[in-house]
Amino acid sequence: MKVLITGASSGIGRDIAREYGKKGYEIVLVARNIERLQALKDELVEKYNVKAQYLSMDLSVKENCINLHGQVKDVDILINNAGFGDFGLFDKTDLDKELNMINTNIMCVHVLTKLYLKDMKERNTGKILNVASIAGFYAGPLMATYYATKNYVVTLTEGIREELRREKSNVKVSLLCPGPVDTSFNSTANVSFSLKGMSSEKVAEIAVKGLEKNKFYIIPGFGVKCGKLISGITPRKISSKVIYSLQKKKEG
């Protein structure tokens, strides 16, 4: 069994790789940081005695996503984890960083999901986990672009799920929607969470267990589950005011 993990050099992606290392999977790691990828690959091989390889790629580039699919075949599980955020008023945040975010958080997920889904449907087996966020169920003032990208991931994956259900396909898609997680996301997004985040190790453990059970929404933590429930019954005008107040506390 082979698992392909993007954004694998740190945080949730790194710890999902470790979870699959424990299970004896062949693991393909993809990110940009060569040193971290090499170190993780060596750890997986030495600690778990599994086959592992890594590819250093900038997945904000469409051609790199297509090339990745061309290089890595026969994937049983795809983990679309690559992504990052940014903080600030929409008219003040950096346009180039936002466009890079859109390409990483949306385009990369879109391309890899489409290409690997075709392969999996031909074999009538396989699983795809798209890593979104509780942010994917809300509008997000002060992190408007990031929230919008995660809304895209949520609705795209929900749509694909229904298509697969109606086709009675054995291919499964899932959404991982964590709340705050203790990763390098905070420094990249220039924020400081006011609430203590869940460890990436715990989120990874919950994610892999959820995939094994073919759960669609994988939402770590009772409070985050409540957040999803509230999103479905609260008008956006009201929830946006609440989100703004919460976001303002993150400013660092």
Image: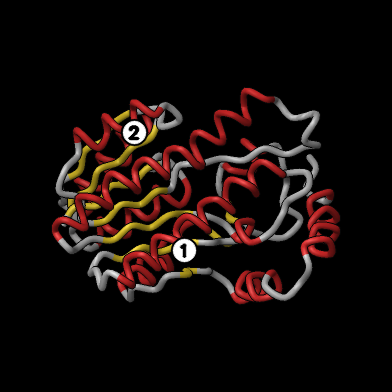
Q: Residue 166 is drawn in which quadrant? A: bottom left
The residue carrying mark 2 is 65
Residue 149 in the image: state x and y as whole percent.
Answer: 58, 45
Q: Amino acid at mark 2?
A: Cys
Q: Residue 59 is drawn in which quadrant? A: top left
Residue 77 in the image: state x and y as whole percent.
Answer: 26, 56
Residue occupying image coordinates x 80% and y 43%: 251
Residue occupying image coordinates x 21% and y 58%: 121
Residue 10 in the image: state x and y as whole percent.
Answer: 45, 43
* Residue 34 in view (yes/no): no
> In the drawing, does residue 225 fall left or right of residue 247?
left
The residue carrying mark 1 is 158
Residue 133's label in the rendered image is none
Residue occupying image coordinates x 59% and y 43%: 185
The correct choice, above or below, for 79 with respect to 196 in the image is above
Quarter of the N terminus within the rendering: bottom left
Secondary structure of residue under mark 2:
helix
The correct choice, above or below, for 93 with respect to 228 in the image is above
Question: Whole-Å distance between the Cαs marked 1 and 2?
Answer: 22 Å
Of 164 and 223, nearer the camera is: 164
The correct choice, above or below, for 32 with respect to 252 in the image is above
Looking at the picture, the colour scheme in use is: secondary structure
Which one is earlier in the sequence, the residue at label 1 or at label 2? 2
Q: Amino acid at mark 1?
A: Glu
Is label 1 or label 2 in front? 1
Secondary structure of residue under mark 1:
helix
> In the drawing, does residue 108 fall left or right of residue 26?
right
